[in-house]
Amino acid sequence: MPKTEVLRAYRFALDPSGAERAALSRYAGACRWAYNYALARKTRAHQAWADRRSAYLEAGLSEAEAKERIRADGAELTDRIKVWDHHRKTLTLTVADKPPLPAMQSPAGQEALVRRLAAARADAAGTSSERELLAEGRAMVNALKAQAFTAGFRTPTAIDTSALWRMDRDLPQQEGGSPWWREVNVYCFTSGFDRAQAAWKNWQDSLAGRRAGQRHGYPRFKKKGHTESFTLFHDVKRPIIRLESYRRLVMPGLGSIRIHDSGKRLARLVERGQAVIQSVTVTRGGHRWYASVLAKVQQDVPVLWEHVHDDGTRTSYLSRTQAEKAADNGGHVEQIGRPTARQRAGGLVGVGLGSHYLAALSSPLDPADPATALVQHPRLLADSLAKLSKAQRAMSRCQQGSGRWSKATAGVCRIHQQITVRRASFLHGLSKKLATGFTHVAIEDLDITALTTSAKGTRDKPGKNVKAQARFNRHLLDAGLGSLRKKLAYKTAWYGSQLVVLDQGEPVTATCAKCKERNPSSDPSCSTFHCPSCGAAVHRHENSTANIVDAAHRKLTTVASDRGETQNARRATASPAARKAPGKGQ
């Protein structure tokens, strides 16, 4: 079997004492404070930029002209920042006895500043004043960046926010400082800055159309008492994050904390040199604290895809899609290894995700048991609904903010957390069986957000069957279909199979699997599919899974071939050059 390096997370439930729980909450609070600190900096800079743009738009400029004018206004300050930053980086490398950076090309109008800083570095070379000059350069870069942020010419990155925070952290709390920062590990702040940067990038990518899926809104500040989480890092050459035994986890600043389950699997990998711990993310879920230890693991995989460059060098990838994307710029893709005997016997399986069954399979999970072709819904929320309703009624009778209200809220969170853990455990088991039992797993590209849209409507146009739709939405969301797809995405790559996601809108439920004719008037609520063309009458899930298998085969085969034009679902020519008849919708 080929071997490759993958990132895997090992999740442990912690068993902290009272003092350790307080320390964990303190660390999570520092991460939340850092996130809000970074987001406030970004929001102020973006608001300043928006004010400048609005002023230019009111003056009669277009959107593009306003943005270009803003860039021109901040060009001089941006060039000064570049010069001073190059000066700082050069001094940093010199102090560390590393080769300095090559001389930079002077921006227009900054020639005198470049010569002055170069002369200052030459005068301080080999003397103790180099460190003083470096401190001056760092302060100047931060001051210029703060000026650019205030004016709206730039938005601070995570590195910029970290540098600004180091300047302000010893100030009194009333002035925006955090004089308590020494009580926690500094990586709590770093992880908060990184999360704010990720949230900001997700919003910008979603706004620009570079991010698929549901539209991300403007980043919001985190409220105390909601999700508590933080991430700690360490030097992998001198590891601090480690398993002290199979039942204790050591983290920087927190010491050794007992874990509920055994860490034997990860500990043995580390002992054999097959895993290197990178970081740990601690999260509170309900009444429990969890530690997710991220490690680089040398893992055996049945199938590995290699991108062979034109010069003969090879780069390994877990999925074929990644390798083919890398080969767009040259080279070719080779498959190393092959699926296991069990996967080859299973072949391609079509998985129909729905409301009646969690998953209807074209082939059973266990070849000896045909009943495993239908996976029932675990109905975890439905089974706990009576207990959850009772806990919520008890919480509603308490005064918000009181001691009894806190205990009642903790009880509600506990039930939700138990449901979440059981659902994740069930989906992990199902996704692993699919990934290890078949060579290809084909699923539909379902839009869960559209399927679970509320039917309440408006006051003028109220919705129909609102209660029934609400029950259906709750039932569908309880299944965790989106989570199942995410688990299949990485587990199929781990275990040598492939995930095939059909195009959105593929008519698998309204097409006859025998004659391939569409029946748009087919009732999805009816358990039997009737074809008016060939007269076939089969169970709906059998018809759907057969269509999923056919669509997956079409997707896996090469579309552009010498056998003529392909056909769409209506058996019409699917050539891009073919004109659509007006009013026919073909």
Image: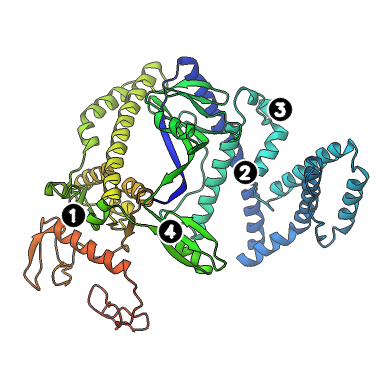
Residue under pointer 3: 170
Mark closer to the chain start, 3 or 4: 3
Q: Are marks 4 and 2 in contact (CB under 8 Å)?
A: no
**Vertical order, 153 against 401 (above or below):** below
Which badge, 4 or 1, is on the more N-terminal residue?
Answer: 4
Q: CA distance from mark 1 to mark 3?
A: 64 Å
Look at discs 4 and 1 and give the one toward the viewer: 4
Q: How far apart are the two marked residues, 2 and 1, measured between alpha carbons?
A: 49 Å
Which of the two discs, 3 and 2, sits closer to the camera?
2
Q: Are marks 3 and 4 in contact (CB under 8 Å)?
A: no
* Residue linked to disc 2: 158
Which label number is shown at residue 305?
4
Q: Position of residue 443 (x, y in %)?
A: 28, 56
- Give the distance between the C-alpha atoms of the residues marked 4 and 2, in whole angstroms: 34 Å
Q: Tell me where residue 179 sits by quadrant.
A: top right
Q: Cα distance, mark 3 to mark 2?
A: 19 Å
Q: Which residue is mark 1?
A: 363
Please, is residue 571 above or below residue 65 in the view?
below
* Whether residue 67 is situated above or below residue 126 in the rendered picture: below
* Dot 4 or dot 2, earlier in sequence: 2
Mark 3 is surrounded, within 10 Å at the Cα level, by few (under 14), some (14 to 19) or many (20 or more) other residues, namely some
Residue placed most toward the observer, 318 or 50: 318
Tell me which residue sits at (63%, 46%) in the image: 157
| Alpha carbon separation for disc pair 4 and 1 | 27 Å
Asked if disc 1 and disc 3 are in contact, CB closer than 8 Å, the reply is no
Task: State which mark lies toward you, 4 or 2.
Answer: 4
Report the amino acid beneath label 1: Ser
Residue 509 figure quarter? bottom left
Q: Tell me: 311 left or right of 425.
A: right
- Colour scheme in use: rainbow
Identify residue type, mark 4.
Answer: Trp
Mark 3 and mark 4: span between their CA atoms?
A: 51 Å
